[in-house]
Image (cartoon, helix red, strand yellow):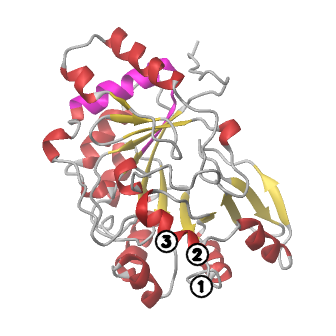
Amino acid sequence: MKKILHDRFGRKIEYLRLSVTDRCDMKCDYCRIDSFKDYSEKESWLNFDEIERIVRAFVELGVGHVRLTGGEPLLRKNIDHLAQRLSSIDQLTDLSLSTNCSRIESMADRLYRSGVQRLNVSLDTLNPDTFYQITKSDLSSVLTGLQAAKKVGFDPIRINTVVMRGVNDTEIEQILDYCSENSFTLRLIETMPMGQAGQDSTRRYIDLQEIKKSLQKKYNLIPIVLPGGGPARYYHIADSDIKIGFITPLSQHFCDTCNRIRLTVDGILHTCLGQEHEYPLRDIIRHGVSDKELKQHIMQAIALKPEKHEFKENPTISVRSMTRTGG
């Protein structure tokens, strides 16, 4: 019988978001400020043996979903080799990847064959100028990468769009049409005050209930449930194959059903995006703990998971940038 890992509030913890690098080849202005230099040293990164050992411990405790994140995870050398090792772990039912897709064209086939099943792709606009304004990068490589990923068979491919007032809020229907044409699922996300960049971006915050009401004037949105361990509330547009999700950490928080924990590239467990609690695992495993002791430390970390974030009550509480925390 598969084990089930619970926190002290009775929530099932079944989803590990695993950051394999804190580097990124884009400079999204809601993720990190231009002057950001607070990268970890590569010597401090978990190696593949350590990552596999930690993931195996989580899976044996009951976690079934693992998402590889960054930064941009495709910057981690031999990421497909790591994916192959993780996908071979018994009872790991779902291995997915978050990426900006700018580098996936040459890697898509290897990643797919390594056992990565699903992709979440960051894409905030289809306008090249707006894309450069947000990311300081080129849109064409992302669109090319998306087509390469689609061709090799990744399914589903979910497009993550952070909605920002005065930046891309008038493009939602255009992005939705693009997703419909390519059989992608669109997921709209509210900005969060993560680190200095996220706190600066709050001036562009939009309550996604506003966007949803606007879409409902044109579309009949029917609630549905899609597989995967994430927090989106999904809808199917009647008389079509279009699916859209809303991730609303501020307007309709989902803390009471949070099933996630994050592991940074340097081996720190974070139990909540909106809190500064952390539990270091790297030094523990490098000091020779047994697998049983490692699982005990993981359970101690889970016991520290707070009931909810405090983004609204204390928007400056989370000083970590998203690139350090992992997506």
Give how far across and how far down residue 193 sits, in percent. Answer: 52, 59
Secondary structure at numbered mark 2: helix
Point 56% across, 17% down: residue = 2
Disc 1 target residue: 166
Mark 1–mark 2 CB contact (< 8 Å): yes
In terms of sequence position, does the residue under pointer 2 or pointer 3 come before the other?
3
Instruction: Tell me if mark 3 has few (under 14), some (14-19) or many (20+) residues whose alpha carbon lies within 10 angstroms of its own.
Output: many
Question: Does residue 90 appear anywhere in the picture?
Answer: no
As drawn, the label of residue 284 is none
Residue type marked 2: Arg
Q: CA distance from mark 3 to mark 1?
A: 16 Å
Give the side of residue 190 with respect to residue 73, left or right: right
User: What residue occupies the far bottom of the structure in this picture?
Assistant: 129
Instruction: Tell me if mark 2 has few (under 14), some (14-19) or many (20+) residues whose alpha carbon lies within 10 angstroms of its own.
Output: some
- Residue numbers of the magenta segment: 49-67
Disc 2 target residue: 204
Point 22% across, 29% down: residue = 49
Secondary structure at numbered mark 3: loop
Q: CA distance from mark 1 to mark 2?
A: 7 Å
Give the side of residue 154 with respect to residue 253, left or right: left
